[in-house]
Image: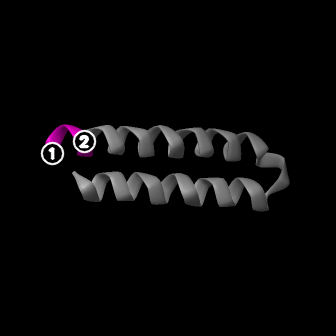
């Protein structure tokens, strides 16, 4: 499960960087940033429920 979370975080980070580099894709940066935050919060709650 941890590998899935790390893979998703890496994917969202890459998409955010691509959105910043290509100026016409600002919406991609916004969506990737939101998904990154949602995934990070979700992972935090998942780790709390295990302990």
The residue segment tinted magenta is: 47-51
The x and y percentages for residue 43 are 34, 44
As for residue 29 lying within the magenta part, the answer is no
The x and y percentages for residue 9 are 45, 54
Q: Name the residue nearer the viewer: 40 or 19.
A: 40
Q: Is residue 26 left or right of residue 29?
A: right
Give residue 7's mark. none
| Residue that appears at 78% across and 45% down | 26
| Residue that appears at 27% across and 59% down | 3
The x and y percentages for residue 33 are 61, 45
Residue that badge 2 annotates: 48
| Quadrant including the C terminus | top left
| Residue that appears at 57% across and 60% down | 14
Quarter-of-image position of residue 45: top left
Kind of element beneath mark 1: loop
The x and y percentages for residue 47 are 25, 46
The answer to whether the residues at label 1 and label 2 have Cβ atoms under 8 Å apart is yes
Q: Name the residue nearer the viewer: 44 or 24.
A: 44
- Sort mark 2 into few (<14), some (14-19) or many (20+) by Cα contacts within 10 Å: few
**Outermost residue toward the right in this view:** 23
Q: Is residue 18 left or right of residue 44?
A: right
Residue that badge 1 annotates: 51
Position of 21 relative to 41 (above/below): below
Q: Name the residue nearer the viewer: 34 or 28.
A: 34
Question: How far is mark 1 from mark 2, CA to CA?
Answer: 6 Å
**Outermost residue toward the left in this view:** 51
Q: Is residue 39 left or right of residue 37?
A: left
């Amino acid at each position: 499960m941890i590998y899935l979370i790390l893979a998703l975080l890496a994917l969202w980070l890459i998409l955010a960087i691509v959105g910043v580099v290509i100026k016409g894709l600002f919406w991609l940066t916004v969506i990737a940033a939101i998904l990154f935050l949602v995934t990070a919060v979700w992972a935090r709650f998942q780790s709390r429920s295990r302990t």
